[in-house]
Image (cartoon, helix red, strand yellow):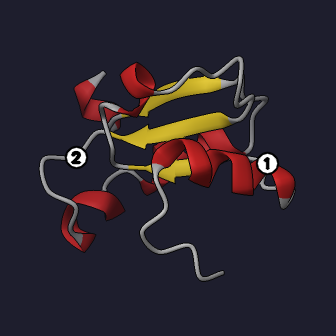
Amino acid sequence: MDWNGKKNGELLKLMLNEGFEVLITADKNLQNQQNFTKYPIPVLTLNVKLLTYQHVVELLPKLKKYLNSELSNGSTFVTKESDI
């Protein structure tokens, strides 16, 4: 969508305007940087050591559960089942 280089707040605004329903990110600090009353969108934050396929694939079962449930606005950390 040619959104490379957009700042977080601008990105969230664009997502809302385009009808996106959720943001999946590895930015663990996003919850401290954004006002989710201003940007009412659920954010699933991947809790991984490294943003690699190997680490992300371990979160897919939990991520799928979240995506199939009612999500509240703001950040929710997605961790491996064994990390809970």
- Crowd band around label 1 with a 10 angstrom C-alpha radius: few (<14), some (14–19), many (20+): some
Earlier-in-chain disc, 2 versus 1: 1
The amino acid pointed to by label 2 is Val
Horizontal relation, residue 65 to residue 19: left or right = left
What's the mark number on residue 71? none
Q: Nearer the viewer, mark 2 or mark 1?
A: 1
Q: SS for tag 2?
A: loop
Q: Is residue 69 above or below residue 38?
A: below
- 9 vs 84, nearest the viewer: 9
Figure quadrant of residue 42 = top right
Image location (x, y in percent) of residue 27: 33, 43
Residue 57 at least partly seen: yes
- Reading the image, the residue beneath label 2 is 48
The amino acid pointed to by label 1 is Leu
Image quadrant occupied by the N terminus: bottom right
Image location (x, y in percent) of residue 19: 86, 56
Distance (Cα) linking label 2 and label 1? 26 Å
| Residue that appears at 22% across and 61% down | 51
Figure quadrant of residue 54 = bottom left
Image quadrant occupied by the C terminus: top left
Image location (x, y in percent) of residue 29: 31, 31
Q: Is residue 36 above or below residue 5?
A: above
- Reading the image, the residue beneath label 1 is 16
